[in-house]
């Protein structure tokens, strides 16, 4: 008998994963894994043994290393802006985004969340499943006019690979649900992700080579330079507006989806130099040209002209003798000397102080008002009215010779003459 027998064939009884994963096995034992379609070799020390690598399970081995793997959490909800009706996919919390996938990476779409099984029904009530599929020719796949795309796609229920039909049929029985797709150089572009049961839930998938900075679709580039906003951007996309020169970042969260301008970190302003304005010299003033440019200039000196104004000694004059208008209220804290026209409220008369305001203008003083003129004081346009007092009020005055009042008790004009109030009537001074 030969020590190395030659046999026609060996049949190893197939075992399921749940059996093979929990056993240690004796050293040298071999089993056939009927779910992964490969052999399991045991050393007697490692639970689950070692899987023989084949072209059928290489993706599984790569995924277990975590290298080149991206996992998305899939949930189901409604359009936060209320524009679209019905159930929609959220990928990592973003409302049905256009996805940009990189060649050479494997992407896992995790559907463990209960919204995938029930929404819009409450969790645990009537099932309304939303299994994800891929299509290369229609955004609604088989529910539209397209077909199912399955190349490098693996459906899993409770971590075991299953067919697409079993994934759908047993969706509610499993607690672990996922679909994975590996992007290669032959993956068609664009792809679409869609719901097996409902239309309008998904969006476009575009692909890019690692480090290219762009995708196979111009509108899906992660960095865009254009005069208009990119179509269907994803969270974190950058757009440089070539019209106004402003950089924007696309922010998509649970509250809103919008382009925002990056803000400059707060900087404490302690000097005009912090604003990017060059400093002047001591005593200069800051001016602007009205177009955003700032410069420092020396203040006006005697003899200088600013516009139509000329400063000479203590005189402010205009080059063309035009009037000087002071808009706000003006307070004179010392003597006011009028050498020519003084206009009050619009109208001027030569050598006159004129008030054209409505009502009864009043010249008031805390002490004495003196009217002085070389040829006398003339009252025009109305009577000269004396102040009215009764005897008690009159006697309370600090009178000076020459003062005159109208006495309301005897209805006579009285004058203070030589230290005594005297009455003036038809017969003269009494």
Image (spheres, rainbow, N blue to C red):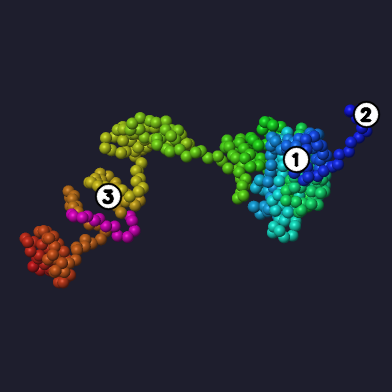
What percent of the width, then of the height, locates residue 236?
62, 40
Residue placed at 59% from the left, 39% from the top?
Answer: 248
Q: Secondary structure at mark 2?
A: loop
The part of the image, by quadrant, that contains residue 311 is: top left
Residue placed at 32% from the left, 38% from the top?
Answer: 317
Question: Closer to the observer: label 2 or label 3?
Answer: 2
Q: Which residue is mark 3?
A: 352
Residue 111 drawn above or below residue 241: below
Q: Which residue is mark 2?
A: 1
Asked if residue 286 lies in the magenta stretch, the reply is no
The disc, 2 or 3, on the residue closer to the chain's N-terminal end is: 2
Q: Is residue 186 visible?
A: no
Q: Which residue is mark 1?
A: 24
The part of the image, by quadrant, that contains residue 204 is: top right
Residue 385 drawn above or below residue 281: below
Calculate the distance from the C-alpha at mark 1 to the C-alpha at mark 3. Answer: 119 Å
Badge 3, how many Cα within 10 Å: few under 14, some, many 20+? Answer: few
Q: Is residue 255 visible?
A: yes
Question: Closer to the observer: label 1 or label 3?
Answer: 1
Please name the predominant secondary structure of the magenta segment in the image. loop
Query: In the image, 392: left or right of 236?
Result: left
The disc, 1 or 3, on the residue closer to the chain's N-terminal end is: 1
| Region of the chain picked out in magenta, as a range | 356-368
Badge 2, how many Cα within 10 Å: few under 14, some, many 20+? Answer: few
On the rendered image, what quadrant is the C terminus found in? Answer: bottom left
Query: In the image, 203: left or right of 286?
Result: right
The disc, 2 or 1, on the residue closer to the chain's N-terminal end is: 2
């Amino acid at each position: 008998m030969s020590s190395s027998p030659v046999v026609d064939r060996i049949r190893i009884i197939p075992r399921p994963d749940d059996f093979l994963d929990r056993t240690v096995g004796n050293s040298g034992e071999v089993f056939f894994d009927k779910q992964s379609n490969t052999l399991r070799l045991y050393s007697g020390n490692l639970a689950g043994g070692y899987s023989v690598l084949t072209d059928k399970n290489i993706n599984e081995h790569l995924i277990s290393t975590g290298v080149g793997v991206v996992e998305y959490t899939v949930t189901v909800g409604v359009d936060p802006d209320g524009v679209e009706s019905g159930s929609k996919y959220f990928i990592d919390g973003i409302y049905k985004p256009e996805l940009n996938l990189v060649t050479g990476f494997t992407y896992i779409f995790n559907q463990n969340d209960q919204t995938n099984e029930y929404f819009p029904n409450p969790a645990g009530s009537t099932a309304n499943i939303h299994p994800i599929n891929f299509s290369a020719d229609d955004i609604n796949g088989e529910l539209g006019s397209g077909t199912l795309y399955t190349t490098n796609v693996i459906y899993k229920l409770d971590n075991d690979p299953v067919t697409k039909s079993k994934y759908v049929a047993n969706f509610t029985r499993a607690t672990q649900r996922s679909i994975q797709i590996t992007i290669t150089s032959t993956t068609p572009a664009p792809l679409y992700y869609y719901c097996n049961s409902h239309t309008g839930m998904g969006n476009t998938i575009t692909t890019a080579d690692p480090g290219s900075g762009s995708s196979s679709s111009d509108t899906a580039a992660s960095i865009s330079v254009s005069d208009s906003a990119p179509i269907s951007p994803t969270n974190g996309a950058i757009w440089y507006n070539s019209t106004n020169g402003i950089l924007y970042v696309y922010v998509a969260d649970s509250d809103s989806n919008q382009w925002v301008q990056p803000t400059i970190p707060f900087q404490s302003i302690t000097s005009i130099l912090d604003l990017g304005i060059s400093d002047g010299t001591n005593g200069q003033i800051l001016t602007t040209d009205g177009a955003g440019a700032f410069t420092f200039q020396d203040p006006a000196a005697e003899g200088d002209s600013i516009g139509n104004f000329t400063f000479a000694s203590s005189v402010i004059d205009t080059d063309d003798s035009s009037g000087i208008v002071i808009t706000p209220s003006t307070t004179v804290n010392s003597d006011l000397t009028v050498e020519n026209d003084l206009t009050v409220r619009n109208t001027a008369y030569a050598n006159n102080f004129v008030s054209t305001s409505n009502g009864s203008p009043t010249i008031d003083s805390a002490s004495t008002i003196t009217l002085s003129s070389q040829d006398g004081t003339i009252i025009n346009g109305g009577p000269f009215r004396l102040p009215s007092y009764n005897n008690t009020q009159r006697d309370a005055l600090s009178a000076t010779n020459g003062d005159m009042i109208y006495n309301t008790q005897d209805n006579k004009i009285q004058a203070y003459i030589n230290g005594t109030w005297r009455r003036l009537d038809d017969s003269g001074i009494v």
